[in-house]
Amino acid sequence: MPGPPLLFYDLGSPYAYLAVERAERVLGEPPELRPILLGAIFAARGHGSWSATPRREAGMAEVGRRAAAYGLPPLRWPADWPPNTLAAMRAAVWADRAGRGAPFARAAFRRAFAEGADLADPRVLADLATAVGLDGTAVAGAIASRGVKDDLRARTEAALDLGVRGVPTLAIGDRLLYGDDRLDEASGLRRS
């Protein structure tokens, strides 16, 4: 059997929130969460998010329907969704490097989509870091560091090279499954 499934995410993606919240339950094991910068993926592919199109309201309603169907709390969209997630994704990389990446990602997704918090707010990022056992006062310096910046860029470029075209994307062996609605299919791949 291949190694653990890899789940590529960006904290601004409500579909990635849905996938991260239910992946372990559906797959029967926790995936390895991989933070990447979705804006860079969009730039490389030459298109942007559905959130900036006339499909925005319909997309938000669909995410809400899926959250309810999956038994997740009702969505509370951040007021300025989607936020600029660059700082949040750098914080996610910093947390991952410190061994707290998965708890940080889960807490950040819940704060954004179950509580409506703005992940572009440095205070929210500091609170999240503290909540998962990291030094909240160190977040600002960490996300400004060259090492974290370069690491996020390298992770995003590696995802692009692998063929990731958006988030959430689940990698199982050499298969890429794009979309939160592909988790059930992934579950079948894990058992075969």
Image (cartoon, grey):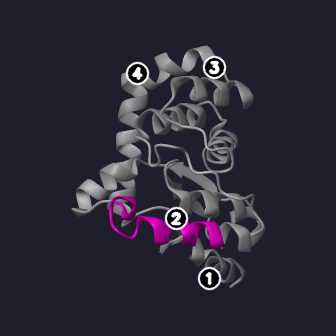
Between residue 164 and residue 107, name the one nearer to us: 107
Rendering coords of residue 68 (x, y %)? 72, 69
Rendering coords of residue 139 (x, y %)? 54, 21
Q: What numbered label is drawn on residue 185?
A: 1
Question: Label 3 amino acid?
Answer: Gly
Closest to the camera, between mark 3 and mark 2, is 2
- How packed is label 2: few (under 14 Cα within 10 Å), some, or many (20 or more)? some
Closest to the camera, between mark 2 and mark 1, is 2
Question: Magenta region's main secondary structure?
Answer: helix
Above or below, 153 relative to 184: above
Q: What numbered label is drawn on residue 144?
A: 4
Asked whether residue 61 is drawn in magenta, I would say yes
- To which residue does mark 2 refer? 60
Above or below, 99 relative to 22: above
Question: Label 1 amino acid?
Answer: Glu
Q: Which residues are magenta?
A: 49-65
Label 3 and label 4: CA atoms lie apart by 14 Å
